[in-house]
């Protein structure tokens, strides 16, 4: 979330702690009930009882907190007591060395997506929108703070659970020049979109403006993430089967780009495809991409003319010397990956033709 919301969230988090600590002391007190002729008995306190008991308290000491948050704090408190079989939990300190990280829970119905922002408790919150929250219905969740004082909006969403009716299948080759190439020829370019920002980055770096450098880096990262989300969403919406190649280390060894950047991008794309596919009943398969560059996706052989080894690295286009098919290097690889995923034999002697 954006930093400008921190002050308000910190206030709510403070009130959450007030309610929590009061629930803590009261549950410890109220659990023990005198039984005439027997003594004291630990009967525990339910969230429902505490809810009633804390009504006046929360009105007075947590005036700006949403009533749903109050209820959720008490509910979580009761649940934890049960889990740890105790009447009393740790206190939530709002300051000092033992300060609890900010936490503002809410129940289903109180946070909604409206006009491109999260609306909660009479306020609008800008969030870094990467997952397309507008497509989902929010359930319960929380605002939470990390150790660096940054706030995050966590929410359980209602997945549309629309099962795909697409019968088409697509293969994806993960690469260096292009992040990903599909068997239908669509490519996700790794660099193109960031060129403009890279120019700005260079200027800021030369000027020694550290803050700006940091900001631009963050922007590039976010744009990349968004591009991957768009790309994966489109694939999942349009295909019933998605096959992806695992990335060979030889590919990584010969790149000028930072390994971590590529790794992170590939991993992010795979993760997104995996969960989005699951949500819509799309089959997502990962296959061994060995030989996918060398084999001809038309005839299945590994012809003498295909790109191989170090010398083959620069080859972008080639013609199969066995069957005469013309290939774009990466699209051919993506087709081979697709064939593999659809259950054709592993390319030991080349990939059998479709
Ligand atoms: Zn061929």
Image: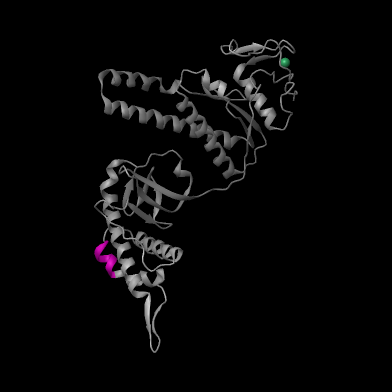
Residue 207: image x %, image y %? 25, 19
Residue 209, above or below 235: above
| Magenta stretch: helix, strand or loop mostly | helix
Taking the spot 68% from the left edge, 32% from the top edge, the residue there is: 341
Quadrant holding the C terminus: top right
Q: How many marks?
A: 0
- 190 and 45: which is toward the camera: 45
Instruction: Give percent across and percent down for residue 121.
Output: 33, 54
Ligand 1 sits in which quadrant?
top right
Which residue is more in the foreground, 297 or 30?
30
Q: Which residue is rendered at x = 45% and y = 44% of the image?
A: 134
Point out the residue furthest to the bottom here: 37
Tell whether position 331 is magenta. Answer: no
Quadrant, the N terminus: top left
Pinpoint residue 28: horizontal percent, then vertical percent.
34, 71
Give the answer, above or below, for where 36 lies relative to 88: below
> Does residue 69 appear to the left or right of 315 in the view shown?
left
Q: Magenta part of the protein: which range?
A: 56-62
């Amino acid at each position: 979330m954006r930093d400008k919301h921190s002050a308000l969230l910190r206030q709510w988090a403070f009130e959450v702690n007030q309610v929590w600590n009061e629930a803590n002391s009261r549950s410890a007190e109220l659990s023990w009930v005198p039984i005439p002729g027997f003594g004291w008995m630990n009967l525990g306190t339910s969230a429902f009882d505490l809810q009633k008991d804390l009504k006046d308290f929360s009105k007075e000491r947590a005036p700006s907190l949403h009533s749903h948050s109050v209820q959720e704090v008490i509910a979580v408190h009761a649940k934890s007591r049960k889990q740890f079989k105790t009447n009393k939990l740790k206190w939530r300190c709002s300051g000092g060395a033992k300060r609890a990280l900010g936490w503002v829970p809410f129940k289903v119905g109180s946070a909604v997506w409206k006009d491109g922002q999260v609306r909660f408790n009479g306020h609008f919150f800008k969030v870094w929108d990467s997952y397309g929250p507008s497509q989902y219905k929010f359930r319960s969740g929380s605002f939470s703070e990390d150790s660096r004082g940054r706030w995050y909006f966590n929410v359980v969403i209602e997945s549309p659970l629309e099962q795909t009716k697409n019968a088409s299948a697509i293969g994806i080759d993960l690469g260096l020049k292009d992040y990903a190439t599909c068997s239908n020829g669509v490519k996700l370019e790794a660099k193109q979109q960031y060129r403009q920002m890279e120019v700005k980055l260079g200027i800021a770096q030369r000027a020694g403006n550290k803050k700006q450098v940091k900001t631009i880096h963050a922007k590039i990262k976010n744009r990349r993430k968004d591009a991957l989300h768009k790309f994966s969403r489109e694939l999942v919406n349009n295909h019933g089967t998605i096959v992806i190649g695992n990335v060979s280390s030889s590919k990584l060894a010969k790149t000028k780009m930072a390994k971590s950047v590529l790794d992170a991008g590939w991993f992010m794309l795979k993760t997104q495809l995996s969960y989005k596919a699951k949500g819509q009943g799309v089959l997502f398969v990962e296959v061994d991409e060995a030989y996918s560059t060398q084999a001809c996706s038309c005839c299945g052989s590994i012809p003498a003319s295909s790109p191989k080894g170090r010398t083959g690295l620069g080859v972008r286009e080639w013609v199969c010397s066995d069957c005469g098919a013309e290939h774009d290097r990466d699209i051919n690889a993506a087709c081979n990956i697709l064939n593999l995923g659809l259950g054709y034999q592993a390319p030991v002697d080349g990939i059998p033709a479709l």
